[in-house]
Image: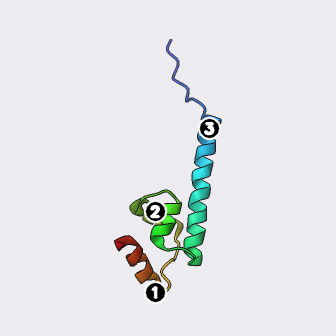
C-alpha cells in the first residue's frame, strides 16, 4: 500500500524570511498611506516591483493619492 505524501513542514528560516517580508510590506504601506513617501519609494521599500505593489495596495484598499503635488512627485521619481 502506498501512503500519500505528507507536506514538509515550513522551516523556521522560511518563516522568518516571510515574516520579514510582511513587515517590509506593512511599513511601506503605512508610509505610503501617511503620505511620507511616494508610491514608487514605497514599492522600493517593500522590495516589490511597481505592478506587484500596486496589486497589494489595491487588495489592502489603501488610498494614497491625496493631491496634485503627490502625483507630480511620483511621476518625477519614476521618470528621473
Is residue 3 positioned above or below 78 on the image?
above
First in sequence, mark 3 or 1: give its number: 3
**Rendered residue at 54%/72% (across/down):** 32
- The quadrant holding residue 11 is top right
Where does residue 73 sit, x and y in percent of width and height? 44, 80
The residue that appears at 45% across and 69% down in the rendered structure is 40
Q: Nearer the viewer, residue 16 or 5?
A: 16
Mark carried by residue 13: 3
Q: Extreme top residue here?
A: 1
Q: Earlier in the sequence, mark 2 or mark 1?
A: 2
Is residue 59 something one can see in this rendering?
A: no
Q: Is 15 situated above or below 29?
A: above
Image-based side of 53 in relation to 22, left or right: left
Disc 1 crowd rating (10 Å Cα; few below 14, some 14-19, many 20+) is: few
- What residue lies at 60% left-to-right and 32% top-to-bottom? 9
- Relative to 35, 49 lies left or right: left
- Residue that badge 2 annotates: 53
The scheme the figure's colours follow is rainbow
User: Residue tagged by mark 1?
Assistant: 69
Q: Residue furthest left?
A: 79
Q: Is residue 80 left or right of residue 30?
A: left
Of the two numbered discs 3 and 2 on the same chain, state the one appearing first in sequence: 3
Where in the figure is residue 44, as x and y percent of width and height?
Answer: 48, 62
> Please, what secondary structure does the residue beneath circle 3 have?
helix
Residue 71 percent across, percent down from the top left = 42, 81
Residue neighbourhood size for the residue with mark 2, other residues' Cα within 10 Å, grouped as few (<14), some (14–19), many (≥20): many
Amino acid at each position: 500500500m502506498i501512503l500519500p505524501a505528507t507536506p514538509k513542514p515550513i522551516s523556521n528560516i522560511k518563516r522568518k524570511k516571510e515574516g520579514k517580508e510582511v513587515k517590509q510590506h506593512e511599513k511601506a504601506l503605512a508610509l505610503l498611506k501617511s503620505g511620507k513617501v511616494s508610491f514608487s519609494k514605497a514599492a522600493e521599500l517593500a522590495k516589490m516591483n511597481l505592478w506587484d505593489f500596486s496589486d497589494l495596495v489595491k487588495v489592502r484598499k489603501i488610498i494614497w493619492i491625496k493631491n496634485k503635488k503627490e502625483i507630480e512627485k511620483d511621476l518625477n521619481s519614476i521618470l528621473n
